Amino acid sequence: MALVKKTFTLGLDDCKIYPIKSDTETEYKVDTGIDVPTVQSINIEFEVDEKELFGDEQVRDMYSKAKKVQWTIECGELDLDVQKALMGGAVTASGSTPNQQQRYGYTLGVLNNYVQIAAKINYTDELNDVGDLHIHILKAKVNKNSFSEASDEYGTVSFGGNGINTTYNFPDGRALYYTINETGSELAPIVSA
């Protein structure tokens, strides 16, 4: 029996950020993945360029083409390595017990890094033999990054941005993958052969 092409989902079980090492016409490689801790949500939307030809008091034609993949991720822990992967900057350690420090430092004006974003949802349609769902945004840059804290709630970190096509010509698409797996598998990046 062929694997189904649809599934319901519940919960977000894993999310990783993979800094892109190279994206050329001949190869696409990423660095070691950085876990997004306590990931709570991922949202994906397409930004579409749309034009309408209006005449004779009616819409005569519509032009519609996806320009970017817009994404947002929310998590429950501030991770300095995730911040560095997304924004640039540096993480430095100093001191000795009991006065150790880990510090993330960032200077405005630094260019953000390209990353691959990968997410995994384990709870899927078991009645149709679906193991899990993997989501990959192949070439993304952050354009918003926030940390919020309230006196009586856990803090949250939210970041989002845009995904564009890779330079490398993957045969199945160059911007976004939704992969339904018959057998659940560990989250791994998409790279060239």
Image: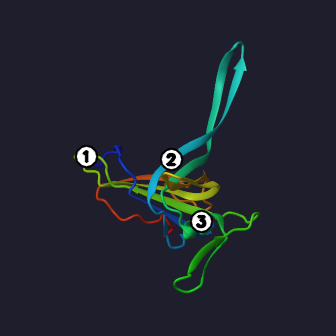
Residue at (54% x, 43% y) in the render: 45
**In-image side of 15 versus 90 (left or right):** left
Q: Along the line of sight, which residue is nearer the eye, 167 or 92? A: 92
Residue at (63% x, 57% y) in the render: 142
User: Where is mark 2, residue-wise?
Assistant: 43
Q: Along the line of sight, which residue is nearer the eye, 44 or 150? A: 150
Separation of marks 2 and 1 at Cα, in angstroms = 25 Å
Question: How many discs mark residues in the rendered view?
Answer: 3
Which color scheme does this rendered protein use?
rainbow
> Do tag 3 and tag 2 residues touch (Cβ < 8 Å)?
no
Q: Which mark sits nearer the N-terminus, 3 or 1?
A: 3
Residue at (62% x, 65% y) in the render: 25
> In the rendered image, is residue 28 in sight?
no
Residue 83: mark = 3
Q: Callout 1: 10 Å neighbours few (<14), some, many (20+)?
A: some
> In the rendered image, is residue 134 in sight?
yes
Helix, strand or loop at disc 2? strand
Q: Along the line of sight, which residue is nearer the eye, 87 or 2? A: 87
Q: Along the line of sight, which residue is nearer the eye, 97 or 106? A: 97
Q: Residue furthest bottom?
A: 96
Residue 128: mark = 1
Helix, strand or loop at disc 1? helix
Q: Which mark sits nearer the N-terminus, 2 or 1?
A: 2
Separation of marks 3 and 1 at Cα, in angstroms = 38 Å
Q: Quadrant of residue 135?
A: bottom left
Amino acid on which disc 3 is placed: Gln
Amino acid on which disc 1 is placed: Asn
Q: How far across and how far down the image is residue 51, in percent?
A: 68, 31
Q: How far across and how far down the image is residue 2, in percent?
A: 28, 48
